[in-house]
């Protein structure tokens, strides 16, 4: 039951019930603190259950950040390192393959691979990482390189986005992760990540990927210098590309973690702001099937609660996450499958293990490390 009498919320509620799209103004209004988060959560839950029923998805995955050395100096990033700093590292082939072996041994279906743009590494170095892992561990889905890396490869090779993606797919790339989106509006983007893959590039790369049949995710980094208008503008831009291509699988709102960044004077968003943003994302992105509550970034309690505020996916078991932990995340390094399933059940949802492409995972009863992809989860939106 919706308790608030806020007149505008009534109008938004009737839009949600009749599946009418919310506007920029609707979205901005939902950030008004006078509208209780609970009420927005209830609306988001209508959409969440319409699209995903009572299921809470998760996967078994690991992260790989082959280097943290980066030519860019994004002000929000605690992970990057200068070329000659003591903090900088570059993994060698042996370490990379060992990570793959560890992942497969632990039943992972996915490896999430992103990293810095190393001053001295060529495109071939990045491609080789994919090739090595795909050859040694063909069962792992490689979700790798954001538009920030792909745009860097364009600069390095002077080749087209399509050619680069084609070569990466031939090497074993499975899909693109959602990073590098930050905030698209130039009033913010120019201040937090200057020259890094400009907004039009980010979209051109995802559009090209989708046209080639490569699925991808999308994100939004919130809780720093942006205003509600910038967030809603960001969501609408994503919604427009999705109308055109249908290639996004999931949206992940990413709460800013300030520690060890150039914005460490800013406070981390509160749990209520996280839940509000989750719910508003579900309501605005009526054409993206999944909304992910990334527990590493939200904390376990908020991620679990988010399953009733629009989210239907809690990401994965996750190993070796560095980007958030370098920025002060206090979440554990990994969660076991039992713990994830318990969290989902406690939230009143039915846990379902999915692979990266949102197919149900069928585990071999005698050897749980072995799996096959089952039916595709319908993307009814
Ligand atoms: O693009 C970097 C963000 C992103 C900080 O596709 C920060 O399934 C908060 O995209 N505080 C990378 N955020 C992570 C990412 C992601 C995560 C989980 C799943 C998927 C997926 C994608 O992390 C960056 C940036 O927006 N980020 N530094 C920070 N200090």
Image (cartoon, rainbow, N blue to C red):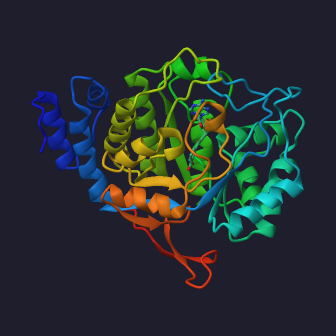
Residue 365, by quadrant, is: bottom right
- Does residue 170 show up? no
Image quadrant where one finds the N terminus = top left
Q: Say whether residue 209 is left or right of residue 161.
A: left
- Does residue 128 show up? yes
Q: What residue sits 38% from the left and 23% below the top?
A: 229
Q: What residue sits 80% from the left and 33% below the top?
A: 69
Nearer to the camera, 280 or 33:
33
Residue sitting farthest toward the bottom: 366
Q: Where is residue 228 in the image (x, y as percent from the top left)?
A: 38, 24
Q: Where is residue 136 in the image (x, y as percent from the top left)?
A: 80, 68
Residue 57, by quadrant, is: bottom left
Vertical relation: 371 (above or below) 156: below
Q: How many marks?
A: 0
Nearer to the camera, 107 or 81:
107
Q: Position of residue 133 (x, y in %)?
A: 78, 62
Nearer to the camera, 343 or 267:
343
Image quadrant where one finds the C terminus = bottom left
Vertical relation: 86 (above or below) 142: above
Q: What residue sits 17% from the left and 41% below the top?
A: 13
Q: Position of residue 97 (x, y in %)?
A: 82, 60
Q: What residue sits 73% from the left and 41% below the top?
A: 115
Q: Say whether residue 227 is left or right of residue 72.
A: left
* Quadrant location, ligand no. 1: top right
Vertical relation: 66 (above or below) 50: above
Q: Say whether residue 128 is left or right of residue 60.
A: right
């Amino acid at each position: 039951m919706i308790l608030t009498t806020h007149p505008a919320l009534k109008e938004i509620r009737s839009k949600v019930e009749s599946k009418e799209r919310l506007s920029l103004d609707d979205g901005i209004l939902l950030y008004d603190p006078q509208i209780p988060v609970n009420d927005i959560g209830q609306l988001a839950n209508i959409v969440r259950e319409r699209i995903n029923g009572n299921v809470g998805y998760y996967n078994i995955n690991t992260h790989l950040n082959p280097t943290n050395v980066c030519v860019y100096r994004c002000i929000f990033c605690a992970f990057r390192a200068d070329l000659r700093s003591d903090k900088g590292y570059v993994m060698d082939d042996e370490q990379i393959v060992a990570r793959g072996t560890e992942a497969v041994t632990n039943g992972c279906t996915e490896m999430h691979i992103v990293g810095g743009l190393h001053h001295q590494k060529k495109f071939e170095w990045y491609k080789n990482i994919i090739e090595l892992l795909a050859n040694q561990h063909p069962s792992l889905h490689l979700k790798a390189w954001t538009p920030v890396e792909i745009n860097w490869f364009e600069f390095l090779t002077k080749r087209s986005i399509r050619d680069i993606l084609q070569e990466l797919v031939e090497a074993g790339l499975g899909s693109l992760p959602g990073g590098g989106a930050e905030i698209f509006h130039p009033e913010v983007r120019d201040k937090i990540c200057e020259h890094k893959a400009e907004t039009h590039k980010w979209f051109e790369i995802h559009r090209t990927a989708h046209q080639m049949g490569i699925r991808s995710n999308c994100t939004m980094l919130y809780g720093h210098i942006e205003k509600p208008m910038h967030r809603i503008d960001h969501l609408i831009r994503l919604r427009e590309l999705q109308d055109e291509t249908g290639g996004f699988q999931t949206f992940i709102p990413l709460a800013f973690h300030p520690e060890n960044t150039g914005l460490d004077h800013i406070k981390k968003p509160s749990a209520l702001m996280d839940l509000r943003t989750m719910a508003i994302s579900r309501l605005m992105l009526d054409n993206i099937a999944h909304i992910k509550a990334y527990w590493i970034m939200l904390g376990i309690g908020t991620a679990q609660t988010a399953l009733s505020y629009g989210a239907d996916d809690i990401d994965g078991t996750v190993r070796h996450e560095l980007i958030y932990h370098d920025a002060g995340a206090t979440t554990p390094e990994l969660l076991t499958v039992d713990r994830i399933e318990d969290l989902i059940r406690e939230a009143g949802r039915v846990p379902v293990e999915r692979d990266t492409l949102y197919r149900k995972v069928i585990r071999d009863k005698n050897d749980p490390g072995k799996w096959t992809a089952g039916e595709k989860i319908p993307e009814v939106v």
